[in-house]
């Protein structure tokens, strides 16, 4: 499972160098922390060779010589010219960027609080001097929405994805306080990774199916249409299309995928069935059965797994599992079988 987390990350953050290739096939990872540490070690090492990300930052300083633009107002207010100095505003090209601050923060977090082997701790420590001029920030201050990627920072995408998983999913546990990190990624973080992995997998291998997270409009008819703006928006995780056929996939990552009634009966979670039915029925505007819906759960260790394939009011509805513990070639085969629904 740990090795396949890397594969999911490689797809989710668009870092596939060879289709389905596991770059860490010969490595042993006892913990998820070790995997994340190795991704950072290799990724940052590569960045150091080709040059760490730099960006321009606006600075304002009192200088003996003119640099950039003179701030006359501040120079006058500070009486700088009396001392033979001027206040200047200028741009400086430096390493202290948000991307590098996050890298430094997460490296230290893994070294101090992660379950990382001594060998990888030492490798991370050897990389830290390259970030001496980078400010150390608190994890709570990081705003992931501020991250952007351009030509100079595109190679940071996988590294930032790794850091986001560490910070969002490996925060200090309640039991151990600030002394260690949780031993696994939270369901919320894994759910987001799982969804992105599935979407990027089909974008890479099946662009002809136009994979996207599409919006489903409510199929409103009849004379009553007041308060329509109060209806909740519906966005699918993955929508695949070929010809006149559509498959809506709702990715589900839960530690327990089935619900159990008070009488001991296991069944698909009610809310999940209602959700996929709403998506499918409203997307099938022609009501001709051309739209199908699938709940795709990450397989758990439970004895009973979702295994549903029925037609409800003309639309095919299924609940299946994807076994993330399988070797990549078998996992790949499961994903390819789903694409045959559009044949």
Image (tube, rainbow, N blue to C red):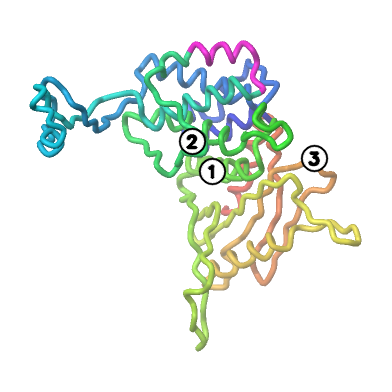
Labels 2 and 3: the sequence-earlier one: 2
Residue segment shown in magenta: 115-126
Dot 3 lies on which element? Answer: loop
Q: What is the spatial separation of the Cα atoms under label 3 and label 1, in whole angstroms?
A: 23 Å
> Disc 2 vs disc 1: Cβ atoms closer than 8 Å?
yes
Q: Quadrant of residue 31?
A: top right
Residue 125 lies in the magenta stretch: yes
Q: CA distance from mark 2 to mark 3?
A: 27 Å
Q: Is residue 328 above or below residue 287?
A: above
In this view, 121 is above or below 330:
above
Whether residue 4 sits left or right of residue 154 in the image: it is: right
In depth, the one of 342 and 148 nearer the eye is 148
Residue 77 among those drawn in magenta: no
- Residue occupied by mark 2: 13
Question: Is residue 88 shown left or right of residue 204?
Answer: left
Mark seen at residue 301: 3
Q: In the drawing, does residue 214 fall left or right of residue 36?
A: left
Q: Is residue 15 above or below residue 29?
A: below
Secondary element at image label 1: helix
């Amino acid at each position: 499972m740990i090795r396949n987390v890397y594969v999911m990350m490689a797809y989710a953050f668009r870092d596939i160098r060879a289709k389905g290739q596991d770059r860490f096939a010969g490595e042993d990872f006892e913990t998820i922390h070790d995997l994340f540490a190795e991704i950072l070690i290799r990724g940052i090492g590569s960045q150091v060779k080709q040059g760490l990300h730099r960006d321009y930052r606006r600075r304002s300083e009192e200088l003996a010589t003119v640099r950039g633009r003179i701030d006359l107002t501040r120079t006058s207010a500070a009486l700088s010219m009396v001392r033979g100095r001027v206040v200047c505003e200028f741009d400086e090209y430096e390493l202290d960027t948000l991307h590098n601050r996050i890298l430094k923060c997460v490296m230290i977090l893994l070294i101090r609080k992660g379950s990382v082997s001594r060998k990888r701790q030492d490798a991370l420590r050897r990389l830290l001097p390259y970030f001496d001029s980078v400010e150390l920030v608190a994890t709570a201050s990081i705003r992931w929405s501020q991250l952007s990627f351009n030509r100079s920072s595109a190679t940071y995408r996988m590294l930032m994805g790794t850091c986001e998983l560490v910070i969002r999913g490996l925060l200090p546990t309640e039991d151990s306080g600030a002394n260690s990190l949780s031993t696994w990624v939270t369901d919320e973080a894994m759910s987001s990774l799982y969804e992105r992995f599935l979407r990027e997998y089909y974008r890479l291998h099946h662009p002809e199916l136009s994979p996207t997270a599409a919006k489903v409009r409510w199929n409103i008819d009849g004379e009553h249409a007041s308060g329509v703006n109060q209806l909740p928006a519906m966005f699918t995780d993955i929508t695949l299309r070929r010809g006149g056929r559509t498959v809506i996939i709702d990715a589900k990552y839960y530690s327990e995928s089935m619900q159990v009634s008070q009488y001991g009966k296991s069944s698909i979670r009610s809310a999940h069935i209602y959700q996929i039915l709403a998506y499918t029925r409203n997307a099938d505007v022609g009501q001709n059965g051309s739209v199908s819906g699938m709940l795709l759960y990450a397989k758990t260790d439970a004895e009973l797994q979702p295994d549903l394939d029925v037609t409800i009011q003309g639309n095919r509805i299924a609940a299946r599992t994807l076994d993330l513990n399988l070797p990549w070639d078998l996992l790949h085969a499961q994903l390819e079988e789903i694409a045959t629904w559009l044949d």
